[in-house]
DNA sequence: ATCACTTTTTGACTTCGATCAAGGTTCAGG
DNA sequence: CCTGAACCTTGATCGAAGTCAAAAAGTGAT
């Protein structure tokens, strides 16, 4: 979950890692060379598991393109998604050998990986990388806590509206499509993945999306393409404080 | 939420900040002097609000004694606890002016506060403080994600069992009370606070505690004093993976 | 275009936890 | 010891979301 100050629009990872949120910005030339030396790219197909919880993970990585999810599964199969990884998000934890969660590619995903040990050494020599990572981690913690409120206290309808609002906000590139107020975007997740994210069943997700459509809060073209005629209206359905304006 | 490697037993904040998890361990004499210069203590009575979400917060702090909670409230009054602050836990975010959550003292709480600006400067000069804070933040993120699984996918009974297990684990000092297998501890929260933590109502919390008592999973002396005759049994009720042994 | 497959929608029914409403405990202070 | 307030328990009922089942819509390969 990225911080609000680094919307996707700012990211262009074609020149990775220079533009990476985690490690760019204040890096000097020799640090960039050091990063270049330990990086490599990996691509995963849609549906492919990037790594299983408990596996040894000898790299940390940054999502360059595509969408991946972090999730936990109980023995009996119940699963809860605990993070959505969008381009520029960071995966893996310096100082930890094994992955704590399953990481799955939702679409075709390219990651820029850094070998863990050398990355940790570089972090030790370069304080601002650690500082940046701290900021990002604190942002993720805030996002996780906002999600706890959603999971613990919101109704199914509010959960769906919140998810749509979050996707709309992150998919800032499409904000101005069509004219004036309308916001248009594609759902990057299947109904089942949405359910895993929201702590619901896929049937309930489907029903609530249908209900929001019936009530005119959203329009659908196909199953994935969403049109929000009035963003304020959608935000009103989230149960969140609307003043302060996330879209201000 | 503290890391597992720093159980409460290791903490003795009488000599704060030397023994603080966040800032101790590797500090040199002059850093300790710098910390001494910017610290002050504050005490809050049970039930008192330490700080409201949105308030200006010009310090960061470490809990020395007592228990406080972090929580979010929606306009209509629904509230969700998002963190439990036990002794040695850190509150406040370097680089942020305003509090993101309500902080409330559950019991009488003493905090060791550091003025934020000088603390941030010290952090800039002393990389290992930032590193330690990153480790702690990552631990909190893991705890938050574990909590997301609980909120999204566990039944009321599993939620209660999980909370009891967590409290039992943190209250390590009392593990060996009585003989052999029994574990004994006091609940640091009222039923309503437990409900806010678990995403339930207080009635459901009460009912499920009664059910666990009826089924012999726990015994109660008064409302707060809990005896767990067989920890494995309780862990079996949490829905979590039991192998790997959190109590190993 | 057709077939096989996955994903989504919708319907009927059930269930878990919320809600509403009494009572019961515990404990501090008179 | 009594009283009031805060906290907890239990019961009856209700409703939101889960479960089970089937049909519809989309997708991709031949």
Image (spheres, coloured by chain):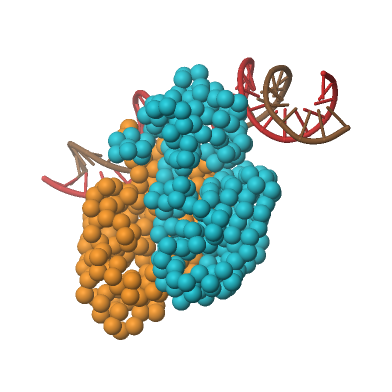
Chain colours: A orange, B cyan, C brown, D red
Q: Nearer the viewer, residue B148 or B162?
A: B162
Q: Residue at x 37, y 72 (%)?
A: A129
Q: Position of residue B189 (x, y in %)?
A: 59, 38
Q: Residue farthest to the bottom?
A: A29
Q: Residue at x 32, y 49 (%)?
A: A101
Looking at the image, how many numbered discs can be counted on the residues?
Answer: 0
Q: Position of residue B38 (x, y in %)?
A: 59, 70
Q: Residue at x 62, y 67 (%)?
A: B58
Q: Nearer the viewer, residue B19 or A37?
A: B19
Q: Nearer the viewer, residue B217 or A163?
A: B217
Horizontally, residue B45 falls left or right of residue B202, namely right
Based on the displayed image, in which of its 4 quarters is residue A201 positioned?
Answer: top left
| Residue A175 visible to the viewer | no
| Residue B47 visible to the viewer | yes
Q: Position of residue A178 (x, y in %)?
A: 48, 65
Q: Residue at x 68, y 45 (%)?
A: B47
Q: Nearer the viewer, residue B63 or B28?
A: B28
Horizontally, residue B19 falls left or right of residue C22, namely left
Is A112 placed above or below B148 here?
A: below
Is A59 placed above or below A26 here?
A: above
Q: Quadrant of the C terminus of chain B?
A: top left
Q: Position of residue A73 (x, y in %)?
A: 34, 40
């Amino acid at each position: 979950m990225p911080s609000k100050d680094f919307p996707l629009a700012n990211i262009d990872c074609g020149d990775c890692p220079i533009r990476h949120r985690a490690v760019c910005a204040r890096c000097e030339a020799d640090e960039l060379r050091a990063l270049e030396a330990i990086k490599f790219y990996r691509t995963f197909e849609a549906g492919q598991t990037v790594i299983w919880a408990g596996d040894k993970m000898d790299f940390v990585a940054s999502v360059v393109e595509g969408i991946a999810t972090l999730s936990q599964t109980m023995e009996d199969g119940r699963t809860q998604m605990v993070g959505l990884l969008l381009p520029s998000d960071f995966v893996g934890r310096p100082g930890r050998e094994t992955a704590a969660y399953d990481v799955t590619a939702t679409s075709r995903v390219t990651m820029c990986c850094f070998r863990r040990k050398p990355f940790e050494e570089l972090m030790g020599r370069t304080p601002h990388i650690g500082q940046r990572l701290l900021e990002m981690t604190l942002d993720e913690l805030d996002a996780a806590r906002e999600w706890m409120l959603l999971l613990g206290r919101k109704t199914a309808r509010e959960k769906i509206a919140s998810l749509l609002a979050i996707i709309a906000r992150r998919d800032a590139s499409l904000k101005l499509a069509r004219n004036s107020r309308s916001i248009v975007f594609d759902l990057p997740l299947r109904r089942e993945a949405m359910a895993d994210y929201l702590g619901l069943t896929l049937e309930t997700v489907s029903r609530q999306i249908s209900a929001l459509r019936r009530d005119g809060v959203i329009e659908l073209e196909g199953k994935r393409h969403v049109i929000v005629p009035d963003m304020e209206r959608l935000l009103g359905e989230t149960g969140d404080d609307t003043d302060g304006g996330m879209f201000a």
